[in-house]
Amino acid sequence: MDGMTADTLLAPSLPGLLRIGPHTVQPPVVLAPMAGITNAPFRTLCREFSGGKGLFVSEMITTRALVERNEKTMQLIHFDASETPRSIQLYGVDPVTVGKAVRMIVDEDLADHIDLNFGCPVPKVTRKGGGSALPYKRNLLRAILREAVGNAGDLPVTIKMRKGIDDDHLTYLDAGRIAVEEGVTAVALHGRTAAQHYGGTADWDAIARLKEHVPEIPVLGNGDIWCAEDALRMMRATGCDGVVVGRGCLGRPWLFGDLVAAFESPGSAPAAPDFGQVAAVMRRHAELLGLWLGDETRGVVDFRKHVPWYTKGFAVGSETRRALATASTLAELDAHLGGLDQTQPWPAHADGPRGRTAAGKRVVLPDGWLGDPYDCATPSSDAESDTSGG
């Protein structure tokens, strides 16, 4: 990992409490917002394994869709009664609309914490000047943050971002300073550029540089945390105040239990699950999705994308994998899972990168976007879709 040396592994003990406004996050671990993944059922699983410790952020909510009360969006902002604090991630490119969305959250008591997305690298977002493209326009970023913080009242506002568009257009240090000046409570940095997408190795040195650059507020690191020990190493190597975990928990919600153990009882890692235990989590995940969506079949169908992550490395067989990935009922899932060897131990090669790992292609941007980084960019009328969740 970048920034890793023998000396950093022997660094002083990890920081104590992470504070996000009035909220204490201990251990300092945050579930990264992931489109189509970090809905209420998945957050429930992660919280159960962590014993309720940590911060679990919703998938991306589009500000325009929220203000217009889009039906899908209103479902996505539902929180279980046990979720405390309730954390919403907003995506927006228009300062006025972002301000209205934040004011709506405050007035209707929809959440306890607001995170703003400036890290998404996908073309449908960057081509409209959103996500990881937006911080390049410094004055637009400032205007959005000013509207968000100004309308948030007592709710803490945080941001998640990338290093920049590419290595020639890095923005994270300027964005971090603007965040501090506009009253943002904390910043999270994914140590990749938009051009890298999810490929290559995350630049942990950049996280360390950001921490040095904005000592006034907590800095959280994100990128290449595949196991609990990675989180400890990142904090020792960078001096960051906490970690944000994304792809590492795909098909592994119990990673949050591992993280709690690593921070609270070093050297006492929980035993890795065997296949029978993994199968039980898969079944519960699918069941929770069905209850959340109000239909068992819809829940099982939505669960299909999780099957490859949960079964990675296990002796499942191509035919059974296909059957699991096309199941439509809980009974079908039970039958296919029950026919496999439940005693299979956790496969060592299942650790490490999971989810999307390919490097991105050219970053798609609005015409002229890389001109003056301080000009008054005006979002197009279609810059925000009317739905949320990616």
Image (cartoon, rainbow, N blue to C red):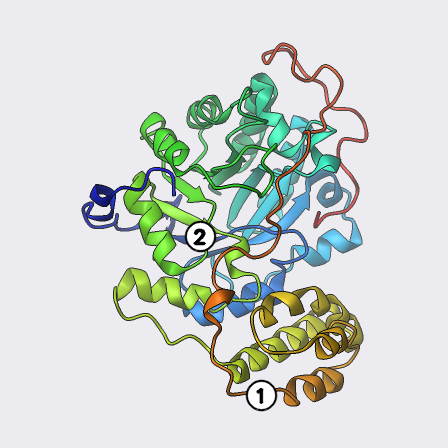
In the picture, measured across the screen, residue 184 lies left or right of residue 363, that is left
Please give the residue where the numbered disc 2 appears in the rendered image: 225
**1 vs 2, front mark:** 1
Q: Nearer the viewer, residue 241 or 90?
A: 241
Q: Amino acid at mark 2?
A: Ile
Q: Is residue 376 left or right of residue 152?
A: right
Q: Is residue 164 left or right of residue 54?
A: right
Q: Is residue 102 above or below residue 260?
A: above
Q: Does residue 104 lie above or below 288 as drawn?
A: above
User: Where does the image place residue 60, in percent across and percent down from the top left?
Assistant: 64, 47
- Decide which of tag 1 and tag 2 comes sooner along the chain: 2
Q: Position of residue 180 (x, y in %)?
A: 42, 27
Disc 1 + disc 2, Cβ < 8 Å? no
Q: What's the mark number on residue 341?
A: 1
At mark 2, the secondary structure is loop
Q: For the point 72% across and 48% down, which residue is it?
A: 388
Q: Which quadrant of the figure contains the N terminus?
A: top left
Can residue 110 be seen from the camera position used here?
Answer: no
Disc 2 packing (10 Å; few <14; some 14–19; many ≥20): many
- Horizontal and vertical percent for residue 183? 44, 29
Disc number for residue 84: none
> Can see residue 334?
yes
Q: Nearer the viewer, residue 256 or 18?
A: 256
- Disc 1 and disc 2: Cα gap in Å? 29 Å
> Label 1 neighbourhood size at 10 Å, few (<14), some (14-19), many (20+)?
some
Residue type at tag 1: Asp
